[in-house]
Image (cartoon, rainbow, N blue to C red):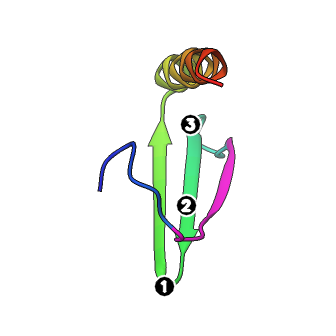
């Protein structure tokens, strides 16, 4: 599956700080649970990528 492939899969997404000073992105779908921890600098880079992708997607509307 790639970025442009549509899917009916549902998933829950949570994002927040951990007690260890990391930023956790937690994805849950069915029986799968995926916790991903990032240091704050990495998390900011991810946030910038999400903002850039949103700006590009707006241009495609």
In the structure shown, which secondary structural element does the residue marked by tag 1 occupy? loop
Q: Locate residue 55, reporting x and y percent.
A: 63, 15
Identify residue for label 1: 31
Q: Would you say the residues marked 1 and 2 are in contact, meaning their CB atoms lie under 8 Å apart?
A: no
Q: Locate residue 2, reporting x and y percent.
A: 31, 48
Identify residue for label 3: 22
Q: Earlier in the sequence, mark 3 or mark 2?
A: 3
Q: Locate residue 47, reporting x and y percent.
A: 59, 23
User: Which residue sits at x=52%, y=71%?
Assistant: 9
Q: Could you tell me how far apart the alpha carbons at marks 1 and 3 are, in whole angstroms?
A: 24 Å
Identify residue for label 2: 27
User: Which residue sits at x=62%, y=14%?
Assistant: 59
User: Which residue sits at x=65%, y=56%?
Assistant: 13
Relative height, residue 5 to residue 4 (above, below): below
**Chain part drawn in magenta:** 8-16
Placement of the C terminus among the 4 image quadrants: top right
Relative height, residue 21 to residue 30 (above, below): above
Crowding at dot 3, Cα within 10 Å, few <14 / some 14-19 / many 20+, comes out as some
Q: Quadrant of residue 53?
A: top right
Q: Earlier in the sequence, mark 1 or mark 3?
A: 3
Q: Is residue 13 magenta?
A: yes
User: Which residue sits at x=53%, y=82%?
Assistant: 30
Which of these two is toward me, 26 or 10? Answer: 10
Q: Could you tell me how far apart the alpha carbons at marks 3 and 2 are, in whole angstroms?
A: 16 Å
Is residue 32 rendered to the left or right of residue 22?
left
Crowding at dot 2, Cα within 10 Å, few <14 / some 14-19 / many 20+, comes out as some
């Amino acid at each position: 599956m790639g970025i442009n492939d549509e899917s009916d899969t549902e998933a829950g997404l949570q994002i927040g700080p951990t007690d260890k000073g990391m930023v956790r992105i937690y994805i849950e779908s069915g029986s799968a649970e995926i916790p991903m921890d990032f240091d704050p600098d990495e998390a900011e880079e991810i946030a910038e990528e999400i903002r850039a992708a949103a700006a590009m997607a707006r241009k495609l509307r």
